[in-house]
Image (cartoon, rainbow, N blue to C red):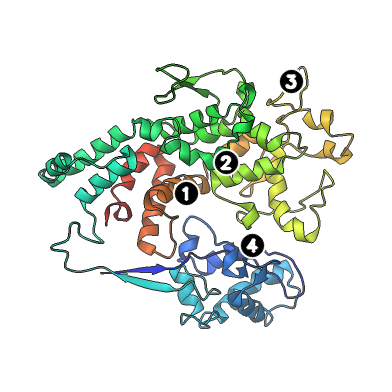
Amino acid sequence: MTRTLAALGIGSITFIGASVVGAMPVAPGIVCETYPGAPSCVGGLPDCNTCHDKTTLPVVMNAFGRDVSLALEAYADKPFEAAAFVGSLPFALTDVESVDSDGDGHTNLTELLEGTRPGDASSVPREITCPEDVTGLDYPICRYDLSFTFRKVNIDFCGMPPTFEEMEAFRAMLPNEQRSALHAKLDACLDTQFWLGFDGVLWSLAHEKIRPLTAFFTEGTNFFFDYALFVWTQMDGHDVRDMLMATYLVTIDLPLGPDDLSFVEYRQVPEIPGQPMQVERRAGMLTLAWPLFYNTMFTALPRTTAAQAYRAFLGLDIAKSEGLDWPVAGEPVDYDNAGVSAPECAQCHATLDPLAYPFATYNGLQADPQIGEFMYDANRIDKYFAQQFPEMVNMPESGVIFGVPVDNLLHWANVAANSDAFYAARVEDYWSLLVGEAPRPDDAASYAQFTALWESLRNHHSIETMLHAFIETEVYGAP
């Protein structure tokens, strides 16, 4: 039995001419149209590393990128105009399929279809062979095993291995009884403080999204409520989309007393002191006080706020040139005179600035006596920034995300929370936690399991339902 693996997943593709610094963010889509079976095209698009070496500054093309660029010259003149580039790239890709650009012994076509990088000699398809005879082993290596999975569920979800007696009782059951006991154990673990409690597993998953700083722990910016809302959306079959769409708030109760965090409970509430956002303008974790305090602060156009939301909730890091496949024509306008229209900046800001416009009507640390901090203010720009940046009075509240025009942040959140990127990012959170690494496009079998999980989550919206499916996968339950 053999599994095809590779050292690294397929990266991104954006092209830069030899003498011109100018990205072609449509390239990932063209790659996927040319090679729809490429692992990186399942539920997403390639990123820059396919053609660029991002370990150097400035970023340069790698061996594959150079070969594709040279092949393009047979069809279009440099610097490549957008229309000529779009029409010629499929032919250039086909022309270099049989070439081994990085000299690692595998053709570019093989690497693209295996999920490795054709411009990186350290990224190569490799094979792991599983033993045919598993007799005498504690667990059948490379094959799903209920006893192994039961032990793993106890450790991963309850925080401790089963006792000897529990394992013996489990092994004595019939297979259908074992499966029922396995899922009953998961249900029990998902209600423990190890999973739900203060600084528990779910809190650790939220750290990167919330980015707490205890130096700023005050009543008005109490990020405990960010953790509470996050945990609530992950538990008891609640709709995970409420991470971005909740109009309610969640508070933390301390049954053992105000100074004892060893046992916490969560409760949905309509209002919380220090969380003043108008109900009709709430967008889940996007509009709580902490992100507006920490990310927006006094910023006119909160690009950082939008970029953090894009990264934390959709798994797309603009700083790594991810998620730039939907540039908006005519952008960036540079309303705040930040210099973003410069060629080296525009390739990112044509996507980022339209993402950020809907955030600009939400107050950070501005203190209008009638509106206040951390609240929606339709006149925010006029009040605080028009004198310094006169052009900002023409900046829209509407924006664009994933190529979809949105009217405001509520619409932004709705599109984001119903996107493939959102569901894939949610499953990737747990995949990285439970498997120990991000999903690997180069392992076709496990990546298909990852894809099936997030596609199913898109239908039922429940993290706990997804986790019950997760523990049934070979990638989780096969030693």
- Above or below residue 247? Residue 471 is below
Mark 3 or 2, closer to the camera: 3
Which residue type carries mark 2? Val
Mark 4 or 3, closer to the camera: 3
> To which residue does mark 4 refer?
26
Other-residue count near label 1 (Cα within 10 Å), few / some / many at <14 / 14–19 / ≥20: many
Other-residue count near label 4 (Cα within 10 Å), few / some / many at <14 / 14–19 / ≥20: some
Circles 2 and 1: CB distance less than 8 Å? no
Marks 4/2: CA–CA distance: 21 Å
Marks 1/3: CA–CA distance: 37 Å
Marks 2/1: CA–CA distance: 14 Å
> To which residue does mark 3 refer?
371
Nearest the eye: 32 or 367: 367
> To which residue does mark 2 refer?
415
> To which residue does mark 1 refer?
424
Of the numbered discs 4 and 2, the one sitting upstream in the chain is 4
| Image quarter in which the N terminus is found | bottom left
Mark 1 or 4, closer to the camera: 1
Nearest the eye: 206 or 468: 206
Secondary element at tag 1: helix
Q: Which residue is drawn at 51% across and 56% down?
A: 44
Which residue type carries mark 1? Ala
- Above or below residue 132? Residue 474 is above
Residue 104 position within the rendered picture, expressed as x and y whole percent measured from the top left: 48, 80
Residue 431 position within the rendered picture, expressed as x and y whole percent measured from the top left: 41, 50
